[in-house]
Amino acid sequence: MPTGFHYSRRVQFSETDLAGIAHFSAYFRFMEEAEHALWRAAGLSIGAAETTGGWPRVAAAFDYKSPLRFEEEFDVTVSIAEITRRSIRYGFTVTRGDTLVGTGTMTAVCTKKEDGQLRAVDLPADVIGRLRAAAGDPPSSGS
Amino acid sequence: MPTGFHYSRRVQFSETDLAGIAHFSAYFRFMEEAEHALWRAAGLSIGAAETTGGWPRVAAAFDYKSPLRFEEEFDVTVSIAEITRRSIRYGFTVTRGDTLVGTGTMTAVCTKKEDGQLRAVDLPADVIGRLRAAAGDPPSSGS
Amino acid sequence: MPTGFHYSRRVQFSETDLAGIAHFSAYFRFMEEAEHALWRAAGLSIGAAETTGGWPRVAAAFDYKSPLRFEEEFDVTVSIAEITRRSIRYGFTVTRGDTLVGTGTMTAVCTKKEDGQLRAVDLPADVIGRLRAAAGDPPSSGS
Amino acid sequence: MPTGFHYSRRVQFSETDLAGIAHFSAYFRFMEEAEHALWRAAGLSIGAAETTGGWPRVAAAFDYKSPLRFEEEFDVTVSIAEITRRSIRYGFTVTRGDTLVGTGTMTAVCTKKEDGQLRAVDLPADVIGRLRAAAGDPPSSGS
């Protein structure tokens, strides 16, 4: 199993489509659920952040390797792929047992609401530290 | 075709499930879309209302008669089934050509935000008048 | 907590709407997830049934008492409200701690595929027995 | 407005989230709806294809530039970005009036069902020709 924070789930009936598999758009919800579970494991809530600005996505992508079917259990592993001054890029690996279901990424920017507008701001240092710890990252040297 | 305001749509792929038909929960979105189209036709927006309180649902129901499949076009007819001092009950009939797909109802309550809490308030008279007109209702006598 | 089979879940971000609460259509997916968890607890899968006919819904309804917000945990209790020759009506109670979120019902009909058409058939006796047992119902006398 | 096939839509209430904007996963459904509208414009249906194999996605991505809000109308432009022997990559540009909402891509592979398994097969020449024509592509030389 890949390194990182683990989130487990089962495919629900409403997530399948007429091809009999989980709809391709469902994987973006799976990634987000795993991201938010990581935040909770880090003692944070992205919901609280929403009132003061939030973390809008700037990019999301998924590569599909093997389908998921109704009631199958799968695991989403989240890791922190890259941190810049104002953004986090998460990496995701979805597996079902030993089978690779696919891999994805999501990039979110830290924002503050000012005069009704969202403005990108520097990532809070403690948020980074907590997320890294919850994702099982080694602490970066010198920080 | 039943009397009322008409909203037309096509079943999208993501709305189907592994049984090959539109998922039963999709009909509640279909009803809401028709309700909001009625509001727009009445020169209103339920979105603007949300900032000051909004119209939370207190009840929703649907009876399924015949399934909808991918890419099928269907029609949702909205009528105003009942108006009380603080609530509207909409009636919905979903048809595909001459086939009855099902019928439903939704009841929404008019609320105002006060100290962060939603409180039920009397329906604004002009909202009722506009919705009735857009739904093709005869004006009620004496109003 | 009400009597019946219990299914627990958390509200996901994608299930909220601009009013800041779980969208009213999400509760129909919550009920279905609880129903399918009951089937699994009974050693059954509604997915397998779909290939030979399945259990289309004929009615679904929900009465909303108190909203659910992002990340809140809630409990869905499923009970078997009524069994007729060819249909099951489930009753649902959604709670968040001591707060009643709402109550709902769903009625599904047992069908078989014949010549590409779904035809209502009698409920298999063992399915009823297993669902009743998993829902904690007292066995009906004489069965 | 960008070149390609145009599909227009309005943001529905159920597609918004507590941040007050269309949820980031909704854009993948917007892209798929536009793709299927392109297929219909080409006289084809991807639904019919599903019974014999279908076009599973192998990759999907979206870059977000500006949010969409409830009831806003937007336009999705689809073009055919690349065709290989067995896959189509679509390019998507989402705009709201003069505002760029974002851009995305989706890659689908042509498959046939053989002994219950999906196997990648060569794209049917007439499908390519029809999609290119509907997307407003200049016919490729020599075809």
Image: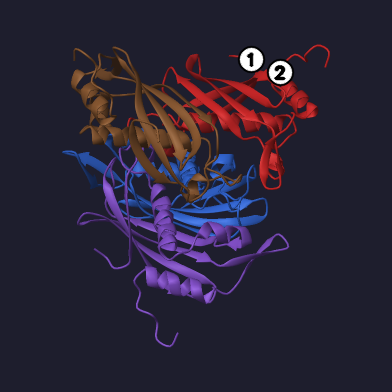
Chain colours: A purple, B red, C brown, D blue
Tell me where residue D47 sits by quadrant: top left
Q: Amino acid at mark 1?
A: Thr
Q: Is residue B134 visible?
A: yes
Query: Callout 2: 10 Å neighbours few (<14), some, many (20+)?
Result: some
Q: Residue furthest right?
A: B142
Left or right: D82 with respect to D6?
left
Residue at the (71%, 59%) spot, across then down: A116
Quarter of the image with the C terminus of chain B in it: top right
Residue at the (70%, 27%) spot, across then down: B86
Q: Is residue B17 visible?
A: no
Between C52 and A11, the residue placed more toward the observer is A11
**Both labels 2 and 1 in a single chain:** yes
Is there a contact, CB below 8 Å, between mark 2 and mark 1? yes
Label 2 and label 1: CA atoms lie apart by 8 Å
Quarter of the image with the N terminus of chain B in it: top right
Whole-percent x, y for residue D109 in the image = 32, 49
The chain identifier of the residue carrying mark 1 reads B
Q: Which residue is mark 1?
A: B3
Between D91 and B118, the residue placed more toward the observer is B118
Q: Is residue B33 above or below residue B74?
A: below
Q: Amino acid at mark 2?
A: Gly
Whole-percent x, y for residue A6 in the image = 32, 60
Tell me where residue C114 sits by quadrant: top left
Q: Which residue is mark 2?
A: B136
Between C93 and B30, the residue placed more toward the observer is C93
